[in-house]
Image (spheres, rainbow, N blue to C red):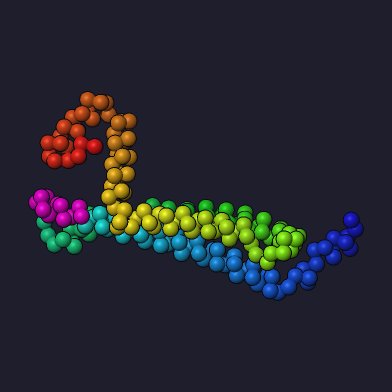
Amino acid sequence: MTNLEIHRYLDFSVFGKGELTLAGVVMLLCWVGILVACIVDTRSAIKRDKRFARVQAEKAIEEGTATGDLDEVAKRFSPRINSWGLGELFGKVGWYYGFLIIAAFADLILLFIDVWKLFHLPEVPYFSAGMAMAFIAREALSVWENSPKNDRYNVIKSLRRLKGACSYLMSDEEMKQIRKELNDIGGSGF
């Protein structure tokens, strides 16, 4: 293959502005969609934590272990926004964007060699769009898990994790003692 043939093959003037514009718009929608989905998921987790803090504050006021206005006590119990939470958000977005960049390279190669024309399909970054949809679906599932409808499930899941950690760290006799004390005060004893 001569240099002239390579130049003709990689001549970008044969690409229509419509093809590149469509691919660019789809890629932009993928990037923005993932960012919005991650922000919505983080917001739903914050709202879930505030709901849990309010319930905890109600119980503390009812038991007499905390005094003051319900909103004030709930604010004391609610977790603070810190660098760890923001780091989680940016880390997750970074991983998603890293995979999206890899998919974008594959889509660009397929766009340049006109594979989609062989199948009579519009030249759209299908891999990037599919990967973005999978990431957005994962974040949507997380938002659903954080919804008020699933609070009971989240508490049960947290208790299972606590039980696993306690059984790893403590002996069976200590676990029996904790169960007995929880049953004495009206707890579930998990």
Question: Quadrant of the image for the N terminus?
Answer: bottom right
Residue 38: horizontal and vertical position, in percent?
44, 59
- The part of the image, by quadrant, that contains residue 127 is bottom right
Residue at the image position 75 percent from the left and 61 percent from the top: 118
Residue 22: horizontal and vertical position, in percent?
64, 70
Q: Residue furthest front?
A: 120
Report the magenta residues as a range: 55-65
Could you say which is closer to the camera, residue 107 or residue 82? 107
Asked whether 58 falls inside the magenta stretch, the response is yes
Q: Residue furthest left?
A: 64
> Looking at the magenta stretch, what is its main secondary structure?
helix
Instruction: Answer above or below: position of 17 versus 172.
Output: below
Residue at the image position 33 percent from the left and 57 percent from the top: 147
Q: Could you tell whether 54 is left or right of 137 in the image?
A: left
Q: Residue furthest bottom?
A: 17
Could you say which is closer to the camera, residue 88 or residue 143? 143
Residue 76: horizontal and vertical position, in percent?
21, 56
Could you say which is closer to the camera, residue 3 or residue 16? 16
- The part of the image, by quadrant, that contains residue 53 is bottom left
Asked whether 134 falls inside the magenta stretch, the response is no
Residue 137: horizontal and vertical position, in percent?
47, 57
Question: Quadrant of the image for the C terminus?
Answer: top left
